[in-house]
Amino acid sequence: MAAPAKKDVPKKAAPPPAPVKPPLKPAALRAVPADPAALLAEHVDELGALEKELVPIRPKLKRVEQLRELIRRRFESKPAGASFETRGRAYLATLGPQAFEASIDLDRLKKIIGLARYAEISRPTLKAIEESLAPDIVAKVVTHSYRGARPLKTFALNADVPADT
């Protein structure tokens, strides 16, 4: 038996494609004004102002770290994975568990995999090389180059001099 004939139904036209929007710029790029030198000057001034605000509290920050260390020392003998609370008259301090870290038994590793394989995967520290090798060998294997962040300090300019001159 033949399949029933389908009625000729007009096909719907495909919807027009969505308009293409220009890609959004990352927020940091949208915030950059036309003059990058002006932005740099703003950042320098903001950094200087913030550092000026920190000057009177720097000694307090040092004392905060000293007190934290004193309090932590009181809990050195306690189980490393446990949390603790301690109270003063006005404040409560909580101490969380110590960091969970992995360590390697290097002597056992050398015995298991052998000295040759151990030497293939070992990465000595610069300090270990400098302390354990002769200076002439160190000079042959250690190179020096400028790397890392540059030190950055701010200094207040004379307030009587306008910034545009």
Image (cartoon, rainbow, N blue to C red):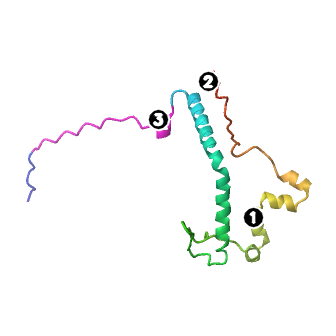
Q: Check disc 1 and report its element: helix, strand or loop.
A: loop
* Residue appearing at x 77%, y 61% in the figure: 124
Mark nearer the N terminus (2 vs 3): 3
Q: Quadrant of the C terminus?
A: top right
Is residue 22 visible in this depiction of the protein? yes
Q: Please name whichever residue, 45 or 4, is drawn nearer the observer in this view of the structure.
A: 45
Q: Is residue 46 above or below residue 119?
A: above
Mark number displayed over residue 67: none
- Circle 3 is placed at which residue position? 30
- Circle 1 is placed at which residue position? 122
Q: Quadrant of the N terminus?
A: bottom left
Write down the region rendered in magenta: 8-32
Q: Would you say 153 lies left or right of 132 here?
A: left
* Residue appearing at x 69%, y 40% in the figure: 153
Q: Check disc 3 and report its element: helix, strand or loop.
A: helix
Q: How many marks?
A: 3
Mark nearer the N terminus (3 vs 1): 3
Cα distance in 3D space between marks 2 and 3: 29 Å
